[in-house]
Image (cartoon, rainbow, N blue to C red):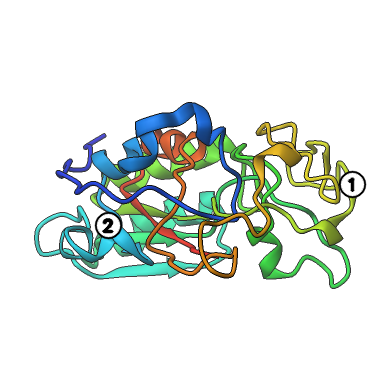
Amino acid sequence: MENCLPWEAPHGPQGKSSSPRAAAENLGDELTKPPRWVSLHCLWEWGKGWGRTVCRYNPNTLPKRTSIVHLFEWRWQDIAQECERYLAPNGFGGVQVSPPNENIVITNPNRPWWERYQPISYKLCTRSGNEEEFRDMVTRCNNVGVRIYVDAVVNHMCGAAGGSGTHSTCGSYFNAGNRDFPAVPYSGWDFNDGKCHSASGEIENYGDIYQVTSLVNEVVSIGTCGAKYSKY
């Protein structure tokens, strides 16, 4: 599998967020620099911060392959076939895929698209497929010169209305009301409510973010070439 080209990422500011702190007190200087996946892989779309400099001009596609497609909610096996049968032969450079990590299962309404944006853990299993299928997709697409970009949801977890139980795509237990997500693990101590150092106590500058690296390092190690980072 051909790897993506690394790039020299500029350092970002120390983060302030209402997202999980990821044991911020123990990270020290790690909060003042991009996570490893940013340093090693360019991002196709980065809402704020580092992506406004280098990334948007170097998406790690092969030469003369600058067009990408967004295969929203596609299954990993189908994306792998699409890379081999259509995208590569027609010169496409990459695919943005839906969030690959575990999310809550919502039945009312029945399995809406936005449940993919209600994370439960960073395990790689969703209705698009499991981790083995995700790895196979990334490998097969990279082998034919089509890069994979993940939709990374790392700035929040499932809301309190999600309740508690194991109704998630991997079957992991969670208690959203208590902010207990042991499969990460996160607890209520890992979240901030109105504790930002700003006039309102809430997020006012989305250029300042906490780095959540466990998920993104894993998908980078699999061979993905970047991500769309959702700021909400």
In-image side of 202 versus 210 (left or right): right
- Residue 44 in sight: no
- The quarter of the image holding the C terminus is bottom right
Q: Residue furthest top?
A: 26
Q: Which labelled disc corresponds to residue 81?
A: none
Q: Which labelled disc corresponds to residue 164?
A: 1
Q: Which labelled disc corresponds to residue 50?
A: 2
Residue 71: x and y in percent read 47, 66
Q: In the image, what residue type sits under mark 1?
A: Ser
Q: Residue furthest front?
A: 199
Residue 165: x and y in percent read 90, 43
Identified at 82% across, 57% down, the residue is 160
Identified at 76% across, 53% down, the residue is 104
Q: Mark 2 and mark 1: span between their CA atoms?
A: 36 Å
Identified at 20% across, 52% down, the residue is 60
Residue 65: x and y in percent read 17, 63
Residue 178: x and y in percent read 84, 45
Crowding at mark 2 (Cα within 10 Å: few <14, some 14-19, many 20+): many
Q: In the image, what residue type sits under mark 2?
A: Trp
